Amino acid sequence: MMEAAGVWQARRVLELGPGTGALTAAIADAMPHDADCLGIELNETFVGQLRPRFPAMRFECACAQEFDFSTVLPPGEKFDAVISGLPWTAFPEELQKAILDNVLPHVATGGCFATFAYWGFHKLPSGRRFRSLLHELTHGVETSRVVWNNLPPAFVYTARKA
Ligand SMILES: C[S@@+](CC[C@H](N)C(=O)[O-])C[C@H]1O[C@@H](n2cnc3c(N)ncnc32)[C@H](O)[C@@H]1O
């Protein structure tokens, strides 16, 4: 996911749903030392654990569909890379769309949005809907190879902002 989203060359990274910090740790390893990273997580307990563990990153306890990104981005600045750990397949269509509609306007032109899907679940109606929405709202969606060693097996969607 880090490679797919180009985190190694990003100046501003956004993580959606950092949870217990597995992807956050990968972001911390991959991003340039002077880059900024913001995590939006609705679970207060997770946010309380993430802040001391990743003191150089910023975490806000908020819903991704409601958070006002203009309050944290300097004027004219956008995110170069978005890493999402959100469970898209479990979300109804309105929530999938509300989150993408709130986030994508704050992604830089040419910036990347990367998220993972579990193999099989992507064929459920909600999984198909999410993929269609990504296609509709971005410049194109790429699908990685399936990582069969992951439990459950998973793959990465990478979408580029037009
Ligand atoms: C699959 S889990 C996180 C996986 C994460 N990579 C980890 O290592 O724990 C999804 C996370 O998204 C958070 N979440 C769910 N809906 C959200 C929303 N609308 N806005 C922000 N965070 C959300 C959950 O609280 C949860 O921590």
Image (tube, helix red, strand yellow):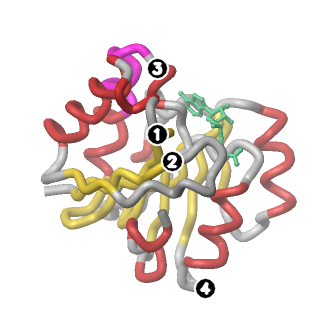
Front tag of 1 and 3: 1
Tell me where residue 85 appears, x and y as whole percent. Answer: 56, 44
Q: Is mark 3 within 8 Å of ligand 1?
A: yes
The residue nearer to you, when weighing 72 against 123, is 123
Q: Are marks 4 and 3 in contact (CB under 8 Å)?
A: no
CA gap, disc 1 to disc 3? 17 Å
Q: Which amino acid does label 1 sit on?
A: Trp
Q: Is residue 93 magenta?
A: yes
Query: What residue is disc 2 on?
Result: 154
Which stretch did the figure color magenta?
92-99
**Mark seen at residue 33:** 4
CA gap, disc 4 to disc 3? 34 Å
* Image quadrant where one finds the C terminus: bottom left
In this picture, residue 112 sits left or right of residue 15: left
CA gap, disc 4 to disc 2? 29 Å
Instruction: Describe the element under mark 3 as helix, strand or loop.
Output: loop
Front tag of 4 and 2: 2
